[in-house]
Image (cartoon, grey):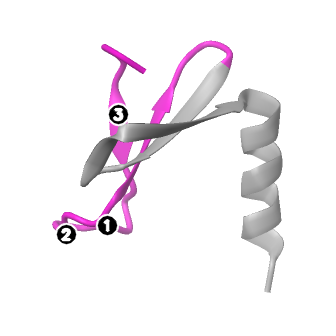
Amino acid sequence: MGTGRWRKSSYSGSQSACVEVGSLAKRVDVRDSKDQTEVLCFRREQWRTFLAEIKYSD
């Protein structure tokens, strides 16, 4: 994602094992805060679908 802004999950607190999300115009990037070299990239529609699925899953 380069120079974009990353946001840490609010559930992470002060721990170092965190998920970070970066948002660009057409995609959302996700990475592990401990290993920032690997980044998963999602189209915005894919990210919304993913969030909807995990929000309503049991």
> Are discs 1 and 2 less than 8 Å apart at CB?
yes
Left or right? Give the position of 47 relative to 25: right
In terms of image quadrants, where is residue 27?
top right
Question: Horizontal and vertical percent for residue 52?
Answer: 80, 57
Identify residue type, mark 2. Gln
Total label count? Answer: 3
Residue 16 lies in the magenta stretch: yes
Q: In this view, does 27 lie above or below 21?
A: above
Q: Which mark is residue 15?
A: 2
- Measured Cα–Cα span from mark 2 to mark 3: 16 Å
Q: Name the residue under label 1.
A: 12
Q: Dot 2 lies on which element?
A: loop
Q: In this view, does 49 lie above or below 44?
A: below
Residue 15 lies in the magenta stretch: yes
Q: Residue at x 80, y 39 (%)?
A: 46
Q: Which residue is drawn at 83% across and 48% down?
A: 49
Q: Mark 3 points at which residue?
A: 6
Q: Is residue 27 above or below residue 30?
A: above
In terms of image quadrants, where is residue 1?
top left
Depth check: 43 or 52 in front? Answer: 43
Question: Horizontal and vertical percent for residue 11?
Answer: 38, 68
Left or right? Give the position of 16 relative to 27: left
Q: Residues within 10 Å of mark 1 (few under 14, many from 20)?
A: few
Magenta part of the chain = 1-26
Q: Dot 3 lies on which element?
A: strand
- Measured Cα–Cα span from mark 3 to mark 1: 14 Å
Decide which of tag 3 and tag 1 comes sooner along the chain: 3
Q: Residue at x 37, y 60 (%)?
A: 10
Q: How crowded is mark 3: few (under 14 residues within 10 Å), some or many (20 or more)?
A: some
Q: How crowded is mark 2: few (under 14 residues within 10 Å), some or many (20 or more)?
A: few
Identify residue type, mark 3. Trp
Identify residue type, mark 1. Ser
